[in-house]
Image: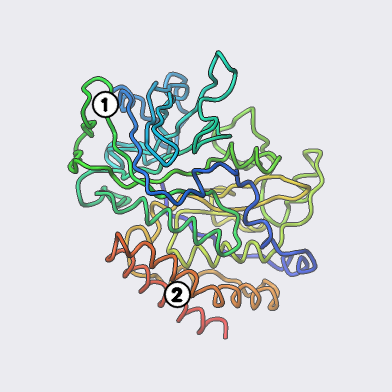
């Protein structure tokens, strides 16, 4: 994987879009009403499956996934106790992620759970539980059990990363950017063959005999279903999928792309793109790309860690995946991210409005960080320092 950031080249066309409504009202689009994302209960979940078999089905990074790996799902059980009683649901467990599926990156990789239908009732086994209404849900794991980090990308191990990443999704939504819903929680993992905690492949080990931090994450299938829309994929995507529409080339040409595919959409609001730019700089995330205009050829592709969904006659653009963000890795804020974002060709009023929104919401952002401090004081302190550096630079750049 390569670290990406948008190199803004020709953005004059964006200035003509200011007459369109802002995307602030779309921050909850795609949200399911399933209780798991709104519960206030402190719950530790147990996931039981054949982890040894699961680890054998890691997908290669940046390559076509073999069918026997792509379609592999290990049977398992998700159990927990909440105020309504004890629950034990059969699930299918599948690995997800790109470079994070490598043993050297995440000895304990991310997963997706699928809730099947009960053959007797033709209802999903999740009906009437915290997961009511869901077919699938993702898990953001601790990546590796031992303290430290991975080689090359320096993914954080030891249980520190999941709740920091979940915080970023909450801040994203708070800043009126569409986002996946999350629930920070804890997981105990049990191997179905041994009845004990799974042994992670080297170089890491399952070092802590207690629930490990993790988070449930809404996935794109749920988002699209709830938005009553469809996912739009990049026309230059390296791995084609016959089930997806490949018509996105760049933000400026979005209406033309849609028309070519037989749809009609409104231009994407420039303030929605500005929010994404400033948000990614706020959380210190390099690992994304979004081509703005046809003249922006600095990146080899048009989308990376960005989703585009068509819903109600418009395209909703939003980012995801923050395990390499500065907030997660507790790295000092880099002025390069905010300094390299050339927003001068956006309309001045749009820039001023979005900057004012961010400044007004700073106390709310810091309040969300304070919640993290209850369990991760050092991480919260680092994030607070990054927030201060960010807003100091924001004041100097956009006075």
Q: Position of residue 207 (x, y in %)?
A: 17, 42
Q: Quadrant of the C terminus?
A: bottom right
Structural crowding at the residue carrying mark 2, measured as other residues with C-alpha within 10 Å and reported as few (<14), some (14–19) or many (≥20): many
Q: Which residue lies most toward the front here?
A: 84
Nearer to me, 261 or 219: 219
Q: Secondary structure at mark 2?
A: helix
Q: Identify the residue shown where x is 42% and y is 73%.
A: 387
300 left or right, relative to 293 = left
57 left or right, relative to 281 = left
Image disc number at residue 390: 2
Structural crowding at the residue carrying mark 1, measured as other residues with C-alpha within 10 Å and reported as few (<14), some (14–19) or many (≥20): some
Please name the residue that numbered disc 1 is placed on: 191
Numbered disc in front, either 2 or 1: 1
2 left or right, relative to 344 = left
300 left or right, relative to 66 = right
Instruction: Kindly indicate the quadrant of the structure image that contains residue 258.
Output: top right
User: What is the tally of numbered marks visible in this picture?
Assistant: 2
Q: Secondary structure at mark 1?
A: strand
Question: Disc 2 or 1, which lies upstream in sequence?
Answer: 1
Q: Is residue 227 above or below residue 367?
A: above
Cα separation between marks 2 and 1:
44 Å
Q: Is residue 300 above or below residue 269?
A: above
Q: Identify the residue shown where x is 72% and y is 65%.
A: 14
Q: Identify the residue shown where x is 45% and y is 31%.
A: 113
């Amino acid at each position: 994987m390569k670290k990406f950031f948008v190199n803004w080249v020709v953005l004059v066309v964006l200035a003509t879009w200011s007459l369109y409504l802002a995307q602030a009202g779309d921050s909850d689009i795609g949200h399911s009403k399933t209780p798991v994302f709104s519960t206030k209960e402190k719950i530790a979940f147990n996931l039981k499956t054949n982890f040894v078999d699961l680890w054998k089905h890691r997908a290669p990074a940046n390559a076509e996934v073999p069918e026997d790996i792509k379609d592999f799902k290990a049977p398992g059980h998700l159990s927990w106790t909440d105020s309504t009683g004890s629950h034990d649901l059969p699930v299918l467990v599948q690995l997800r992620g790109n470079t994070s599926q490598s043993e050297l990156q995440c000895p304990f990789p991310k997963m997706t759970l699928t809730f099947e239908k009960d053959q007797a009732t033709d209802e999903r086994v999740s009906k009437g539980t915290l997961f009511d209404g869901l077919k699938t849900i993702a898990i953001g794991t601790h990546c590796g059990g031992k303290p430290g980090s991975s080689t090359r990308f320096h993914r954080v191990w030891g249980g520190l990363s999941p709740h920091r990443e979940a915080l970023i999704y909450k801040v994203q939504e708070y800043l009126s950017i569409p986002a996946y819903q999350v629930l920070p929680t804890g997981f105990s993992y049990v191997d179905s063959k041994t009845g004990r905690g799974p042994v992670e492949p080297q170089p890491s080990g399952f070092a802590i005999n207690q629930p490990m931090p993790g988070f449930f994450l809404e996935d794109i299938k749920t988002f699209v279903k709830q938005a009553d829309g469809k996912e739009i994929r990049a026309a230059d995507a390296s791995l084609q999928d016959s089930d997806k529409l490949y018509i996105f080339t760049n933000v400026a040409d979005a209406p033309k792309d849609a028309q070519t595919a037989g749809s009609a959409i409104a231009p994407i609001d420039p303030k929605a793109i500005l929010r994404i730019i400033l948000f990614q700089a706020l959380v210190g995330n390099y690992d994304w790309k979004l081509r703005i205009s046809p003249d922006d050829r600095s990146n080899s592709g048009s989308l990376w860690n960005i989703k585009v969904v068509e819903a109600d006659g418009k395209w909703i653009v939003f980012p995801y995946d923050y395990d390499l963000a500065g907030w997660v890795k507790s790295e000092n804020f880099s002025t390069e991210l905010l300094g390299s974002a050339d927003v001068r060709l956006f309309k001045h009023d749009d820039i001023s409005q979005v900057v004012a929104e961010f400044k007004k919401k700073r106390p709310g952002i810091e309040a969300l960080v304070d919640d993290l401090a209850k369990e991760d004081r050092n991480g919260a302190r680092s994030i607070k320092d990054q927030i201060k550096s960010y807003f100091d630079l924001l004041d100097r750049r956009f006075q």
